[in-house]
Image: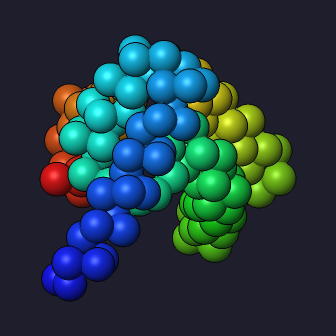
Amino acid sequence: MKMADYSAGRHDGLALALKIIKEGGIEALEQEIKFRGVTNIHTPLAQKDLEKALAPIKEKTIATMLAMSIHVLYDEFDFRTVRLNRFKDRFDSKVDCLIDDMVSWSDIVQDIQEKTKIMIAIPHNG
């Protein structure tokens, strides 16, 4: 790594830290440091800005998961409109629980494993 790149990175990091402190105080900076340690994300965006940038990606991911699930249920298991709508409503309810932090992915995976013995591995950062 070139020294100029290293110096620019340090400058950007300090500028970001100052912005976070001005907007939310020292506690916000502590939360940011904890967030970056947990997620292992290296980005010039603060957590708040990163979450805003990720929102459309999350929405598209959820919509594509729902579309594939409905497609498989229709195509392979002969679910039709009434059952597919019931599935969609329940899917949306579970997504809302995730968004509202009422349940975590770990909780969901553990519940599936306990009830069905099906193992699902969700990769974690770090």
39 or 42: nearer the viewer = 42
Figure check: 80 above or below 19: below
Quarter of image, res 109: top left
For the N terminus, give its image quadrant: bottom left
Q: Is residue 32 left or right of residue 66?
A: left
| Left or right of 86 in this view: 125 | left
Residue 66 at least partly seen: no
Q: Residue furthest right?
A: 81
Query: Which residue is painted at 47% across and 47% down in the image?
Result: 15
Front residue of 16 and 96: 16
- Residue 75, horizontal then vertical, whole percent: 63, 73
Q: Can you give x and y, in whole percent of width and height, for residue 47 in the image?
A: 49, 40
State the colouring used for the structure image: rainbow
The residue located at (20%, 84%) in the rendering is: 2
Residue found 27% across the figure and 31% down from its top? 34
| Residue, far bottom | 2
Place of residue 40 in the rendered image (x, y in percent of width and height, measured from the top left): 25, 51
Q: Is residue 109 left or right of residue 3?
A: right
**In this picture, is 114 found above or below 117?**
above
Number of disc labels: 0
Q: Nearer the viewer, residue 63 or 22?
A: 22
Query: Residue at 73% of width from left, 36% of height from top?
Result: 89
In which quarter of the view is residue 22 placed?
Answer: top right
Examine the rendering and report whether any part of residue 84 can be seen.
yes
Q: What percent of the width, then of the height, locates residue 9?
A: 33, 64
